[in-house]
Image: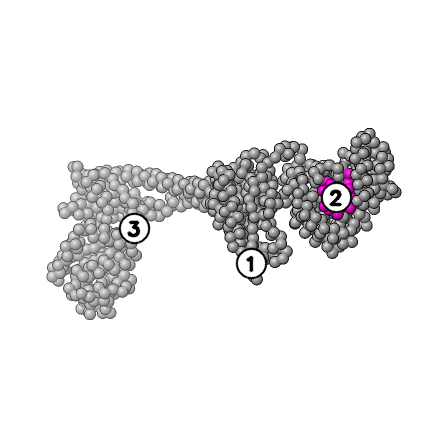
Amino acid sequence: MRFIVHYGRTFTILLFLFPLLGLSASYLYTQFADTKKEIIKIVQQSMLDKKDELLSIYTDYLTDEFGSDYIKVLKDNTSLRRKAETSLSLIKDSEVQYLYLLYIDNNSKLRYLIDTTKDIDEKGEFSQRFYPQKDIWLKAASSQKSEVTAQAEIDKLWITMVFPIIRNEKTVALLGIDFSHAEYLKVNKTLIPLENIYLYSAVFIIVMLISAFLQLVIYYTHRKKSFIDPLTGMFNRQYLHELLQKYPVGDFQVLIMDLDHFKKVNDIYGHDAGDIVLSTVSARIKSAIRKQDILIRYGGEEFILLISNSENDLETSLDLANRIREAVKKEPISLDQCQLNITISMGLNPFPQDSKTFEHVVKIADLGLYQAKQLGRNRVEVYIQCLEEGNVDAQLQICDVRDALDLNKFFCVYQPIYLAKTMKIDSYELLLRMYNTSNEIINPAQFLPSVRHTQIYTHLSKRVIDFAYDTLSSKDIKISINLEVEDLFNEELIVYIIKKFDITKNLAQRLTIELLEYEETLDFSMINQRANELQSLGIKLAIDSFGSGFSSYDYLLNMNISSLKLDAKLTHNIDSNQKALKIVSSIQNLANSMKVTTVAKNIETEEELQIIKKLNIDYIQGYYLSKFIPEVSLI
Amino acid sequence: MIKLLLILLLSIVSSASDIQIEKKIYETFFAALSKKVKPSVYIDVHIPSLELDTDKFSLVSSCQKADIVIVTKKTIDAGCEKKIIFGTRYRHLKKVYVLGAFFWQKGRPNIVFKRQQLDSKKIKLPHALQEFIE
């Protein structure tokens, strides 16, 4: 599986295809070599047939000229031998190197009778013994048929043909023809251009294939490297992306892991120390997982372990997670001058089949991770999916929000907040908006639910802080931003705000954070502590949507709140809703007594405005007074 | 046997250079023709195969000092006729004093020993070479 993901299916196919093509090219060439041999064989046979016919004619001539016992006649008469030699020479052409007639003596030895060779050193003299080196001479004598043999050992010769002369059913002489090797070279030379075309084509194809193969190897090696995170040696997000294109979402349980307080390590000891921690932790995680598990560095200090869903039940996966947790914290990590105790929090999604996308599988695991962090870190949590997420169609997916964040698709608009007494703008509420892929403007109700309790939400909150900081730096106005009460538990975010405004307290004094509650808050000591940290910078805190939610009055009781923003359900249609009028009136009285200002939002009609004014609400905002305005329109 | 010797020659042909083959053949003859372990050989012209390093024979500068004389020219030096004289062409065999000849013809090695000379010099060839006696 990993091989296919590393190298891709195309590479695997090519791995088999290339040698096949190479073999085909080689086969093509060997086929030609065989054909060439066949052509030479045909040429050779044609040459032999021609000479066989001529030798037959010559023996007939000898009979006609010297009588049937011409061997004896020629042996006895030198001049007749010369005549026969001259006649035999007529058969000799460029194909023939040597042409000679041998007789068989009484001891069955071969001796020259006639030799047409001109070179005196090469010419066999009459009765000189001829030493046959091949069986064909005796074979031709005994079979009484022409025999042919190749002369590979003798440089000048190509083939030798032996033609037997038979008298009274007895072989009395043998005519020998040694064909010139030059003739073979001539035939071969004719075929060389064609052979070269085949050879060069085959070589070209093979070279091209090797070259293409090497290119592919280089490409896929680089591709493989691009899947590896250089610091930890783990697979990276790119690999995960490739993996998920090839395997269904339900194939893997997802364990998402995040180092606890890692930011502090980077901030206090520096990034080099952070890198040491990351690589050490990576090694420890690797040592705890199994061969079939796929470990991925998902983000800075965030890792994902893909656990094959086919063979693991929840218990096995939890055991694995706890094994990792134990391995990470088993001993302190040594830095130059100190030792760090590092722990890891984990969220497990053991039900990937319940999600449509991998992003959703990760989100569920991420929610588990969030729970693990909330419950004190160094633990594994499994998030049980709730029905509240049923409205997922209307909401953006987590990946859309992450992409928008990466592509800077977030921006903010401002809604003026008026001082009721003067009806002049006192401050602005900063509201986050997002462009979707169709460049339509999306409001937070559509993108926040999918990322709530994830790191993306923290990033978004930081982005809001950045927007506010930039606006406060460039404009002399007051701004309020919205955060959730749960954000006060987010140490990373609080640290970020403090760091941002610590040295620019003049900016902090013009900032109000409106806190909105989505879940019941129990730990007010922590909230108070964080609120005090923010307020020490000069930041004011307000309660948004007061009059709804879980425990709004708790905030008044436990915290130093500067303003209450009335819930829209109370102010909307207040002119015709007596109960709402009475509640708002009592809240105003309460606020007055606690020296807390009030803000009425969502005022959309003149009637609502007049009632709100009569109730002595301090600040008013709503479409009736002003719609959202872009940053450029701020005074 | 003759066939075996020729096969040997041909197998040498296929695995060694022509000069090495010739040297081996000459060594075989010299061992058969002379009783000395390392006979002295005289050559009247440059013969590369006989000038290679060997412990089977040694070259001498005058034919009078030689046990075996290899001739390539038409005549031999005076006083050498009684030596064991070996020709390098078939025509050398026509000289009475030539005992035998080794030569290449039509790309094939040829060996001939003259019975008369062998008898007069009381040389008995080993069985493998007797096939070449004429």
Q: Earlier in the sequence, mark 1 or mark 3?
A: 3
What residue type is disc 3 on? Ile
Q: Residue at x 81, y 43 (%)?
A: A593
Quadrant in the picture for residue B69: bottom left
Q: Residue at x 42, y 42 (%)?
A: A23
Q: Nearer the viewer, residue B90 or B15?
A: B15
**Would you say A450 lies left or right of A39 here?**
right
Find the magenta span and give its range: A552-566
Instruction: Find numbered disc 2 in the image and state the secondary structure of the residue it sits on.
Output: helix
Q: Earlier in the sequence, mark 2 or mark 1?
A: 1
Instruction: Find numbered disc 3 in the image and state the secondary structure of the residue it sits on.
Output: loop
Between disc 2 and disc 3, the foreground one is 2
Between disc 2 and disc 1, the foreground one is 2
**Would you say A338 lies left or right of A571 here?**
left
Q: Residues within 10 Å of mark 3 (few under 14, many from 20)?
A: some
* Residue B87 included in the magenta stretch of the image: no
Judging by the rendered image, the residue that carries numbered circle 1 is: A339
Asked whether the viewer can see residue B118, the reply is: yes
Q: Nearer the viewer, residue B111 or B19?
A: B19
* Residue A560 included in the magenta stretch of the image: yes
Judging by the rendered image, the residue that carries numbered circle 2 is: A556
Q: Nearer the viewer, residue A289 or A96?
A: A289
Judging by the rendered image, the residue that carries numbered circle 3 is: A154
Q: Earlier in the sequence, mark 2 or mark 3?
A: 3
